[in-house]
C-alpha cells in the first residue's frame, strides 16, 4: 500500500470526483483503506452529494467514533456509529453499503453496524460535490490522513 497512497493534510488537500458517480446505481458499495493521522471535527473521509443530501464516512465530532451516514434531507440523518474504534496511524479496511436491505458498515472484514434505511441514495441527490477528504459542511474539517484503493460500485 505504501507505494500508491493519497496523503491528505487536513488543511485544504482533497480530491473532487466527477458529478453523477452514483446516479445510475440501485445499490452502492464504497470500499477504501483509510489511515487517520488526526481526528478533526467531523473530518469527512469521503462524501457524495451536496449539503443535507450526502452519503459519507467520517469520525463523529473529534472522537474515535467511526460513522457511515446518509442525510436524505435536512434533519433526516441515517447513521451507523461505531464508538471508540479509530486509532491514529493504523490502517483500516472500510466497506460501506447502501442497498435494498439497508445500510451496512464493515471494518477489517467484520460487520460492525447495520441500519434499516434502504432507499436508493442516487434518487435523493443528483450526485454533485463528490469528494475524497473534504467535508460538505464549512465548519467541519478536512480529513487528515491517508487513503488507498478507493473503490465504488
Image (cartoon, helix red, strand yellow):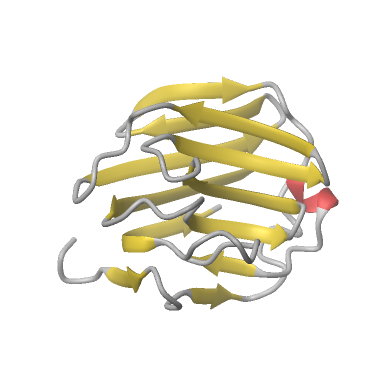
Determine the residue located farthest toward the left in the rendered image: 2
Whether residue 26 is situated above or below residue 12 in the rendered picture: above
Whether residue 97 is situated above or below residue 112 in the rendered picture: below
| Relative image position of residue 116 (x, y in whole percent) | 69, 21
| Relative image position of residue 129 (x, y in whole percent) | 68, 70
| Relative image position of residue 28 (x, y in whole percent) | 62, 45
Q: Nearer the viewer, residue 138 or 115?
A: 138
Q: Nearer the viewer, residue 78 or 104?
A: 78
Report which quarter residue 7 is drawn in: bottom left
Report which quarter residue 83 is drawn in: top left
Judge from the rendering whether residue 53 lies leftward or rightward of residue 46; answer left or right.
right
Report which quarter residue 99 is drawn in: top right
Judge from the rendering whether residue 128 lies leftward or rightward of residue 103; answer left or right.
right
The residue drawn where x is 63% and y is 76% is 18
Judge from the rendering whether residue 82 lies leftward or rightward of residue 72; answer left or right.
left
The residue drawn where x is 52% and y is 67% is 134
The residue drawn where x is 79% and y is 35% is 119
The residue drawn where x is 84% and y is 50% is 123
| Relative image position of residue 120 (x, y in whole percent) | 77, 41
Q: Quadrant of the N terminus?
A: bottom left
Q: Nearer the viewer, residue 103 or 101?
A: 103
Whether residue 23 is situated above or below residue 59 in the rendered picture: below
Instruction: Count the labels in the image.
Output: 0
Amino acid at each position: 500500500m505504501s507505494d500508491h497512497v493519497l496523503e491528505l493534510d487536513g488543511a485544504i488537500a482533497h480530491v473532487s470526483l466527477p458529478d453523477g458517480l452514483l446516479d445510475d446505481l440501485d445499490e452502492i458499495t464504497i470500499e477504501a483503506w483509510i489511515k487517520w493521522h488526526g481526528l478533526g471535527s467531523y473530518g469527512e473521509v469521503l462524501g457524495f452529494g451536496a449539503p443535507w443530501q450526502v452519503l459519507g464516512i467520517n469520525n463523529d465530532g473529534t472522537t474515535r467514533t467511526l460513522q457511515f451516514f446518509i442525510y436524505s434531507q435536512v434533519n433526516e440523518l441515517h447513521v451507523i456509529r461505531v464508538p471508540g474504534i479509530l486509532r491514529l496511524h493504523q490502517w483500516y479496511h472500510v466497506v460501506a453499503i447502501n442497498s435494498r436491505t439497508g445500510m451496512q458498515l464493515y471494518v477489517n472484514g467484520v460487520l460492525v453496524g447495520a441500519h434499516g434505511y434502504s432507499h436508493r441514495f442516487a434518487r435523493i441527490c443528483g450526485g454533485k460535490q463528490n469528494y475524497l477528504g473534504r467535508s460538505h459542511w464549512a465548519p467541519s474539517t478536512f480529513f487528515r490522513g491517508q487513503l488507498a484503493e478507493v473503490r465504488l460500485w
